[in-house]
Amino acid sequence: MDHTKSPQGPQDADVEAKDPQSHSPKPKKELLVVSLPHDNDVMAQEMADLFDEDRVTHQHGSAQPEKD
């Protein structure tokens, strides 16, 4: 057994891992963010357009209550 050679220890491995040229940084992923309007506001406007309380139309018959 030859004890003159020193085995590669964890200190040598740490130096290689810290070398900035050995590992290039990973490119950052960029996500596009699109802002959407609040659904509640859009729904409220659509419902107001559909159900206008000032004018009521009946498509199927009259609005008179039935007699008992």
Image: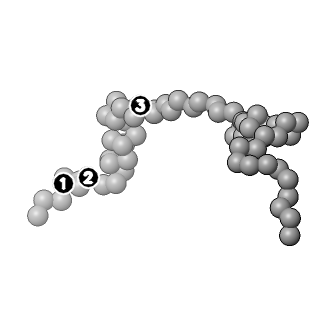
Q: Which mark is residue 4?
A: 1
Circle 1 residues within 10 Å: few <14, some 14–19, many ≥20: few
Does residue 20 sit above or below 60 in this rendering? above
Which is more foreground, mark 3 or mark 1? 3
Percent across and percent down for residue 29 are: 45, 33
Q: Nearer the viewer, residue 33 or 23?
A: 33
Percent across and percent down for residue 18 are: 40, 40
Q: Is mark 2 on a helix, strand or loop?
A: loop
Q: Which amino acid does label 3 sit on?
A: Pro
Percent across and percent down for residue 39 are: 69, 40
Q: What element carries label 1?
A: loop
Q: Which amino acid does label 1 sit on?
A: Thr
Query: Which is more N-terminal, label 1 or label 3?
Result: 1
Name which residue lies at 36% across and 50% down. 11
Q: What element carries label 3?
A: loop
For the C terminus, which image quadrant?
A: bottom right
Residue that label 3 marks: 27
Q: Which mark is residue 8?
A: 2
The residue positioned farthest toward the right in the image shown: 54
For the N terminus, which image quadrant?
A: bottom left
Percent across and percent down for residue 62 are: 79, 48
The alpha-carbon separation of the residues under discs 3 and 1 comes to 43 Å
Would you say the residues marked 3 and 2 are in contact, meaning their CB atoms lie under 8 Å apart?
no
Would you say the residues marked 3 and 1 are in contact, meaning their CB atoms lie under 8 Å apart?
no
Instruction: Decide if residue 34 is in sight here.
Output: yes
Name which residue lies at 32% across and 48% down. 13
Rendering quarter of residue 66: bottom right
Circle 2 residues within 10 Å: few <14, some 14–19, many ≥20: few
Q: Which of 65 and 28 is in front in this view?
A: 65
Which is more foreground, mark 3 or mark 2? 3
